[in-house]
Every structure is written in structure tokens, then in C-alpha cells.
Image (cartoon, rainbow, N blue to C red):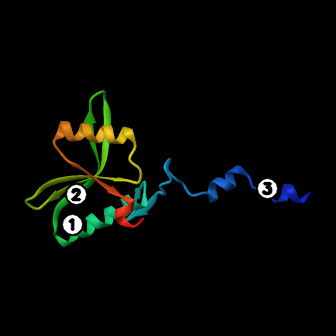
Amino acid sequence: MNARVRDRMSLEDFKKLAKPRGKYGATAVVVDGKRFDSKLEGLRYLYWTNLWRAGAIEWFTRQVPFQLPGNIIYRADFLIVHKGAGVTVEDCKGMLTRVSANKIKQVEALYGFKVVLITKKGWGI
């Protein structure tokens, strides 16, 4: 058997070694047994979990669907209910695409929420 054939790796073995990455380079992570599409979203989840445990917020939930015209669904990463100060909707974005920007504008117009964008730069990622 020659050396070139011995050094080859099957596609299946290569896929086992490769880390799953999103379309824009995001790396999926698991935090508290929950899968997140990016490190930023996982860190933000820990942030809100700690504030909830400390009693600083009422509660929060993640992957909140908003129905848009044309049977389109926009999923915000987090919806946070503050103590006596209303509701915040957040979306973690490494890169804001035109499609996402349009959906966010529609959510803000239809539902009256201001969607807060959380970026990698602000979180040191």
C-alpha cells in the first residue's frame, strides 16, 4: 500500500472531526443542557438566568415566535419580563442581514416591541 492512500481520511471520519458551524461562522454550544446556535446566545442565556435567580427580573423565555404577514415566523432569541418595567425582546446577532432587519422592523411595527440587538462586539466575543 503506498503512502498516499494510507494518509487519506474518509469523508465520514472528517465530518466527525469538524465542528458544526453556522452559515455566518457561528459555533453551536450547549449551556445547561440546552443547545444554542452561537456562543453569544449561550452567554446571553447565562446572563438572564443569573438575573432571574437573583430576583432582578420576573422571568424570561427563549426562541419566541412572532407571526408576520405572508405566513412568516420571526423568532427572537429572548423575551424578558422586568419587574414593573415592561417587556424587552432581544435578538443576538453576529451579522445583521437585510432579511433579519426587515423582519425586525415588521415585528416592531406589528407588535409594538422594540427589538434590542445584542452583538459580539459588546460581549467581547
SS label for mark 2: strand
- According to the picture, the residue beneath numbered tag 3 turns out to be 8
Marks 1 and 3 close (CB-CB < 8 Å): no
Specify the quadrant of the image occupied by residue 119. bottom left
61 or 91, nearer to the observer: 91
Q: Residue at x 73, y 52 (%)?
A: 10
Query: Where residue 60 is drawn, which disc sits there?
Result: 2
Residue 96 in the image: x percent, y percent? 38, 47
Distance between the Cα atoms at labels 3 and 2?
Answer: 49 Å
1 or 3: tag closer to the N-terminus: 3
- According to the picture, the residue beneath numbered tag 1 turns out to be 52
**For the residue marked with disc 2, what is the amino acid?**
Phe
Residue 47 is left or right of residue 38, and the answer is left
Residue 59 is left or right of residue 15, and the answer is left
Q: Residue at x 29, y 66 (%)?
A: 47
**For the residue marked with disc 1, what is the amino acid?**
Trp
Q: Quadrant of the C terminus?
A: bottom left
Is 14 situated above or below 104?
below
Q: Residue at x 47, y 57 (%)?
A: 28
Residue 87 in the image: x percent, y percent? 16, 53
Specify the quadrant of the image occupied by residue 122. bottom left
Q: Quadrant of the N terminus?
A: bottom right
